[in-house]
Amino acid sequence: MEHEILLDVRHLTHIFPLSRKTAVKAVDDVSFQIRRGEIFGLVGESGSGKSTAARCVMNIYQPYAGQIYYKGIDTCDRGQFRKNKKMLQTTRQMIFQDSGSSLNQRMKVRDIIEEPMRVQKIRPLRGSYEEEARFQMKYVGLDPEYLKKYPGELSGGQRQRVAIARALTMEPELLVADEPIASLDASIQAQIVNLFRHLQKEHGFSILFIAHDLDMVEFLCDRVGVMYHGKLVETGPAGAVFQNPLHPYTKALIAAIPIPDPQLEKNKVLYTYDPSIHDYSVDKPEFVDIGHNHFVYGNKKEIEEYKALREKGEPLQPITIRKPGEKVKEENHEVHLSKAEDEFLKTPVHDTGSIWYKVLSFFLPIIGMIAACVYKKKQYYHNYKACKQGALYGFVVLAVILLIFILALILVVL
């Protein structure tokens, strides 16, 4: 059971429409697996698709294409999802980057922690909901007296611990942590990462850990995946990826890790990634295992080069240190998303496009159109689309009924 696959993501693709004619592919044909008891880190620059992939895993977004198997169940299949809904909602939990916004500000901490157990009608292991909440608060290093407070009265680190305590009440088998340390101070980041490590060893659950801080990822994770503009360009054991990065973008990413010695950091020359070095016009790239469970994205020629480098086993140097007084020309070849693309990759968490938006808009089309305009302005695209479709269908039905009524009236008069 140690190496059993808990999560199997296959060819995941997700698209955010920008308008009727344009769209951005946030996640592009991504495949990876997470074993039971494993911590898998997903890294990459902002807008690379990490959070979108995580939200697809949690069914917050419905993927455009691909399959996501959790415990052998295809969670993208609506029938399978409905059949196993309670199991999927209790054994998978997610912690967001900003717990201040993900926690209900109008609820006390006690109610926040107890809420998932009450909603799912789960019997607490420790007798009562309050006892369970007190136990989890102590377990994550918080005084149970904080149960009486509101999230706004807590610090960022304390709110993040509350979010973790809330997730632990469900005894999850998979914990998705979407940049849980990004908005915290450095000292608090280390505390939260150590807490994750302790919890994982204690409970044995799997973690999909998303972060910008590569030092923390290297310390915490068993395996690492590197994303660039929606593509997964390299995955492998954390030690292999950090000590022997093969894809040029991975080398550039690791080169950005600060060196503890300030003098060396001052004289460091970064390796920068230039996407134009790849020629995929004829030989199309693939995501290939080059050995030792180390996957890299590239065409046949590149894969052969990566295999040769991997077999040498010599640590690659993604950085160089200039000599005192030496001038080295640095060029930045990184490509960034447009402002519009970046904004749509920050789609709100509750933008689900639920069928209930369509149903309510169908019966109340005027209100539905008003709601669609509000959602569009706030960039809740899926909700906007659902309300608009429901309202349009409602107007069509009303128009048909009105037409029938007018025809009937004319026949009666004649």
Image (tube, helix red, strand yellow):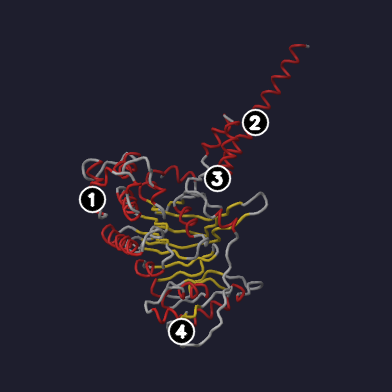
Which residue is labeled 2 in the image?
395
Q: Marks 3 and 1, how far apart in space?
A: 38 Å
> Relative to the observer, which residue lies in front, 358 or 144?
144
Q: Marks 3 and 4, how far apart in space?
A: 47 Å
Say which amino acid is labelled 3. Answer: Lys
Mark 4 / mark 2, whichever is N-terminal:
4
**Horizontal and vertical percent for residue 351?**
51, 45
Mark 3 / mark 4, whichever is N-terminal:
4
Disc 2 to disc 1: CB gap under 8 Å: no
Q: Secondary structure at mark 4?
A: strand
Mark 2 / mark 3, whichever is N-terminal:
3
Mark 3 / mark 1, whichever is N-terminal:
1
Mark in front: 2 vs 1: 1
- Depicted 269 relative to depicted 12: above or below: below
Q: Relative to 287, is 89 on the left or the right? A: left
Which residue is labeled 1 in the image?
143
Q: Secondary structure at mark 3?
A: loop
Q: Quadrant of residue 405?
A: top right
Which residue is labeled 4 in the image?
321
Q: Residues within 10 Å of mark 4 (few under 14, many from 20)?
A: some
Say which amino acid is labelled 4. Answer: Ile
